[in-house]
Image (cartoon, grey):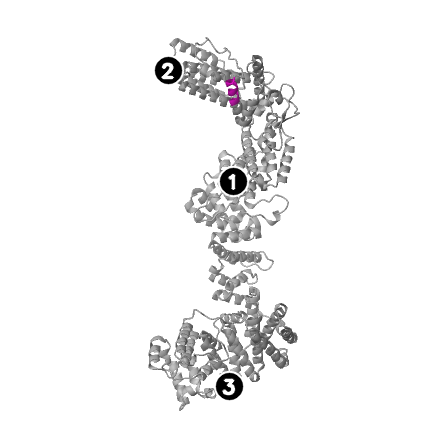
């Protein structure tokens, strides 16, 4: 600060014998030059931040001016300790406000003046401004007017800088001076201090009054333009614009900046003409972005309205002539027209919306007409004002580089402008500010712009440059968070569909196919949660480049590579954006989402092994109910109703190749989502869904009559259909209240009518579903053997159920469920005391069993097996035991095994019937395989039952002998019956019975060896010879040889 001190010493010498504290305005021209030069030298000497050094110097000078004089000893001591400016300021001579104001004017430091003024406490601020205005009004020169108008303009642009430590220190210092001086104890009389009122408001009113005082001194047309522009801007920003105005769009904002800077560039007299672009942009931003902190009082507002009209009337013609002249547009004339245009627009809105008295409305209307008339006569000023070529691009990039106001909006404009893209400056800006473009909307917009440029008709940039830009954008994408990556992916799918960027930009992305293969090889080899985050990142890049190929690759990998499905489902579930449906797909036809389409086109219908089917089912389950890994947000990519509509409903037909897998998927979906609070099945139209299952069940009633290619689902699958139907009806019934009562009744009636087309047993399966609405419809012959309640049951004529078929209908009812089976048994009318009736029932039962068995599913056959046992227990069924495989009458207690022996004989009689001349053509070869499988299940149960009875024995308490001999006899009989049945059947279907025969022999051998004392040696030899004689009749040779060898080893 030595330079500053030297400047003041020189000035003091020039002014002697007077002191600088006595300096007047007229003295400054002779005395002030050393001080001005000192300030200029300080700024020039500062290699960095010259503005800051100038600000420090002016703060020191102003602090010296504010310092109470004369100072007391205690004040001086305090200032030495606490005032950071005092030590330097104390070296300066005592000065007055004239020195300060004239110095600011000489330096043309209106902006700095407003900064320091607004940093002062409110009371001092107003007092200082009043002094300045009094100083300006005294001997007003053109320089005074210019500085006053600049200062006014700066005050409206002022936003405050709360972070500036210099200003904070200046404010603190002023507070201390305020408390130690009487000069500032009371604010000027013309103002009332109100801490709640924005300090700018009274200051603007003071400036308005000052303008009136110096109006006659405003002679230069450019200054008149500034005065009118200031007044119009003040009224617009602080009175007419609503308190929370909407910002103009970024493009309009950029256009305004470009226009202002273009005017500055062409106006050689403008102080910003020689400034660097960044400085021009910063200053232009301040003028374009006037923000109202509060509103002018109504009284001040209407005074200003009237005054503005007065000035326009007084100066209008002169300014119109100037503006319409041939000398071109300078900044002052441009700003006048721009300010009045904005003012006119807002004034019209104010007139339409404000509540005004008649007199006030008249004032506003007259002013509006006056402004409108003025603008009409000068309209070519703004119309003819264009912008320099490429100036908007340079401005936008400068705003981005310097992170100025609204720089993020400029990033969006930058990303959108196709004319700017790929230039050297554009690329450099993108490289230098890559961090700013890590926004999903910006990444999308950049990709859109690059794609448009690359595919446009105009000259396409070099491939190397395109690749460089694409790589940069992909790097920005890679740095996004997962939710933001999903936003980008969603945008890409919306804009470019399933092909993603591949169609337009894949040529500029190096090694996509290699990256795809490498990534999926790694995923298949190291499927672990530890690598999930890295895997998600790798897949994210592939997804935006080519979503379809990537998702299809994941689907096929999940099915083909064992154990990868859950891991891949987790990765896919991290991208909820994949739940995408093209807009052109929306319509009356069912909508297929992107993931579903990929699944159907890639893996559905092409499974080669059960393992692949199992992985597919689990993969879909994970996509519907994703496992939530730590730190990675996931969402379901498939909804249960969507899975049913796409993978189940179209395939609920017996001849559909995928019917078995679809049913498994149906079960999985129902069970996984049965607990959902929302009744999701409603969207799947549950009643048609129930009917579809019923139609499928109906096909099983004529199963063996259908050609083999029409029987894609084995008869075992009937149980799965029945289970799904029961579960579906249970869920729909539990949610009956979600239907309107009228809708529920109509839906039940519709379903009931549709079921009339199907086999009657199908409708009976929905007995509980229709309960209370419809009776159970059965063949009339069922009433002949059952006591059926007419309130619950009704007879219907059914073809094929003539006289004597009641027992057949009864047995078909017993197949349906355990509850109906129990009900049918309870309602059966057979007199146990009448031997003839029991004999006839038993014959009819055997015939009915032969008719029903081939069309039974395993579960239905199990119901009949249990029914037969219960009939035997209740002595309703008579099965005489023949001695065709008994060499000698055994002196044994066979009562514990009576049921097992009777059941074995019954099964033999059934197969004798089935293999008879009248029945042997009923079934195709796979039909025989089916009945053999059913028989195998039942005989296996018999074996288990025999083992249990033998192991638990003795049968009666107090019976000393065990049941080993009896069990050996039963095993012999079972073996003979099995071989008898095998002899009647096609050898191609006998494998299960052959395995069972070996198991029976194993049981026999094991039990015989465990109890060697039971039989005599002769008896064992006789039994062995007998078994061999039975086995001798078996073909082919391999089976006979194995059986005989096993018997020989006893």
Question: Which numbered disc covers residue 1011?
Answer: 2
Does the segment drawn in magenta span residue 866? yes
Q: Which residues are magenta?
A: 865-874
Instruction: Give the x, y percent position of residue 185.
Output: 43, 79
Q: Is label 2 in contact with label 3 (beta carbons under 8 Å)?
A: no
Q: CA distance from mark 2 to mark 1?
A: 55 Å
| Quarter of the picture holding the N terminus | bottom left
Return the residue nearer the eye: 769 or 701. 769
Q: CA distance from mark 1 to mark 3?
A: 88 Å
Q: Secondary structure at mark 2?
A: loop
Instruction: Give the x, y percent position of residue 232.
Output: 58, 74
Question: Which numbered disc covers residue 673?
Answer: 1
Instruction: Give the x, y percent position of residue 551.
Output: 52, 45
Instruction: Give the x, y percent position of residue 145.
Output: 53, 82
Against 570, is 999 above or below?
A: above
For residue 421, say whether it is visible.
no
Q: Is label 1 in contact with label 3 (beta carbons under 8 Å)?
A: no
């Amino acid at each position: 600060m030595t330079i500053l001190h030297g400047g003041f010493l020189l000035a003091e010498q020039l002014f002697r014998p007077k002191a600088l504290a006595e300096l007047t305005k007229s003295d400054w021209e002779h005395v002030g030059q050393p001080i001005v030069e000192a300030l200029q030298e300080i700024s020039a000497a500062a290699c960095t931040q010259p503005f800051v050094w100038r600000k420090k110097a002016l703060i020191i000078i102003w602090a010296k001016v504010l310092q109470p004089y004369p100072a007391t000893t205690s004040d001086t001591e305090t200032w030495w300790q606490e005032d950071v400016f005092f030590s330097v300021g104390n070296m300066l001579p005592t000065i007055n406000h004239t020195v300060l104001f004239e110095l600011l004017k000489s330096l043309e430091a209106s902006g700095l003046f407003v900064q320091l003024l607004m940093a002062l406490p409110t009371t001092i601020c107003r007092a200082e401004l009043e002094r300045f205005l009094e100083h300006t009004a005294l001997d007003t020169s053109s320089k005074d007017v210019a500085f006053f108008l600049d200062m006014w303009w700066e005050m409206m642009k002022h936003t405050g800088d709360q972070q500036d430590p210099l200003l904070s220190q200046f404010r603190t210092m002023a507070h201390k001076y305020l408390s130690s001086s009487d000069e500032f104890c009371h604010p000027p009389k013309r103002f009332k201090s109100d801490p709640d009122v924005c300090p700018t408001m009274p200051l603007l009113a003071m400036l308005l009054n000052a303008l009136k005082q110096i109006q006659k001194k405003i002679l230069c047309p450019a200054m008149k333009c500034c005065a009118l522009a200031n007044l119009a801007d003040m009224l617009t920003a602080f009175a007419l614009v609503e308190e929370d105005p909407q910002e103009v769009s970024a493009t309009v904002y950029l256009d305004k900046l470009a226009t202002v800077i273009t005017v500055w560039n062409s106006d050689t007299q403008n102080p910003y003409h020689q400034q660097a672009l960044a400085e021009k942009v910063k200053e232009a931003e301040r003028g374009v972005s006037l923000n109202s902190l509060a509103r002018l009082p109504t009284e001040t507002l209407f005074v200003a309205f009237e005054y503005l009209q007065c000035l326009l009337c007084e100066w209008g013609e002169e300014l119109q002539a100037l503006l319409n002249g041939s000398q071109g547009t300078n900044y002052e004339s441009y700003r006048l027209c721009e300010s009045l245009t904005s003012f006119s627009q807002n004034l019209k809105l104010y007139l339409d919306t404000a509540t005004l008295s008649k007199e006030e409305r008249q004032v506003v209307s007259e002013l509006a007409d006056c402004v409108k008339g003025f603008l009409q006569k000068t309209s070519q000023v703004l119309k003819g004002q264009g912008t320099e070529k490429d100036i908007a691009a340079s401005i936008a990039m400068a705003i981005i580089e310097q992170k100025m106001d609204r720089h993020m909006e400029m990033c969006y404009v930058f990303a959108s402008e196709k004319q700017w893209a790929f230039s050297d400056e554009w690329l450099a800006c993108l490289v230098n500010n890559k961090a700013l473009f890590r926004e999903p909307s910006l990444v999308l917009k950049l990709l859109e712009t690059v794609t448009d440029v690359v595919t446009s008709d105009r000259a396409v940039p070099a491939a190397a440059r395109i690749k460089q830009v694409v790589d940069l954008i992909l790097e920005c994408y890679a740095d996004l968070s997962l939710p933001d990556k999903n936003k980008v992916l969603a945008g890409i799918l919306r804009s470019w569909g399933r092909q993603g960027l591949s169609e337009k930009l894949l040529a500029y992305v190096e090694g996509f196919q290699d990256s795809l293969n490498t990534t999926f090889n790694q995923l298949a080899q190291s499927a672990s949660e530890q690598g999930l985050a890295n895997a998600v990142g790798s897949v994210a890049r592939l997804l935006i480049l080519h979503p379809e190929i990537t998702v299809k690759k994941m689907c096929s990998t999940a099915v083909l590579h064992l154990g990868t499905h859950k891991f891949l489902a987790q990765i896919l579930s991290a991208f909820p954006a994949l739940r995408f449906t093209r807009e052109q797909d929306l319509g009356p036809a069912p909508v297929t989402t992107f993931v579903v389409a990929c699944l159907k086109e890639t893996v559905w219908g092409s499974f080669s092994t059960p393992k692949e089917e199992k992985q597919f089912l689990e993969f879909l389950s994970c996509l519907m109910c994703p496992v939530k890994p730590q730190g990675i947000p996931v969402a379901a990519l498939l909804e249960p109703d969507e899975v049913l509509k796409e993978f189940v409903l179209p395939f609920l037909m017996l001849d559909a190749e995928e019917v078995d897998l679809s049913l498994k998927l149906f079960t999985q979906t129902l069970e996984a989502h049965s607990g959902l609070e929302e009744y999701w099945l409603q969207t799947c139209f549950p009643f048609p869904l129930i009917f579809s299952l019923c139609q499928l069940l109906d096909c099983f009633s004529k199963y063996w009559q259908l050609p083999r290619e029409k029987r894609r689902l084995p008869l075992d699958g009937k149980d799965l259909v029945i289970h799904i139907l029961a579960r579906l009806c249970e869920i729909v019934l539990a949610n009956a209240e979600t239907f309107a009562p009228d809708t529920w009744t109509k839906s039940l009636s519709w379903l009931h009518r549709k079921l009339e087309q199907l086999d009657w047993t199908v409708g009976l399966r929905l007995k509980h579903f229709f309960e209370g609405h419809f009776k159970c419809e059965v063949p009339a012959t069922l009433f002949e053997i059952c006591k059926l309640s007419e309130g619950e049951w009704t007879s219907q004529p059914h073809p094929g159920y003539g006289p004597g078929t009641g027992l057949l209908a009864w047995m078909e009812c017993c197949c349906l469920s355990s509850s109906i089976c129990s009900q049918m048994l309870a309602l059966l009318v057979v007199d146990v005391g009448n031997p003839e009736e029991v004999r006839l029932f038993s014959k009819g039962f055997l015939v009915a069993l032969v008719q029903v068995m081939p069309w039974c599913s395993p579960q239905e056959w199990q119901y009949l097996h249990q029914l037969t046992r219960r009939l035997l227990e209740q002595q309703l069924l008579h099965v005489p035991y023949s001695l065709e495989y008994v060499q000698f009458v055994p002196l044994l207690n066979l009562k514990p095994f009576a049921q097992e022996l009777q059941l074995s004989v019954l099964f033999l009689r059934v197969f004798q019937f089935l293999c008879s001349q009248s029945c042997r053509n009923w079934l195709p070869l796979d039909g025989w395989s089916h009945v053999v499988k059913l028989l195998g299940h039942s005989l296996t149960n018999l074996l288990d039952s025999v083992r249990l009875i033998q192991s638990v024995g003795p049968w009666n308490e107090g019976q000393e002998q065990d049941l080993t001999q009896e069990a050996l006899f039963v095993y012999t009989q079972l073996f003979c019956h099995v071989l008898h049945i095998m002899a009647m059947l096609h050898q191609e279907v006998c494998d299960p019975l052959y395995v069972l025969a070996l198991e029976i022999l194993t049981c026999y051998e094991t039990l015989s060896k465990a109890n060697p004392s039971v039989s005599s040696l002769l008896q064992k030899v006789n039994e062995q010879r007998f078994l061999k004689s039975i086995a001798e009749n078996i073909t082919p040779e391999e089976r006979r040889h194995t059986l005989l060898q096993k018997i020989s080893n006893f």
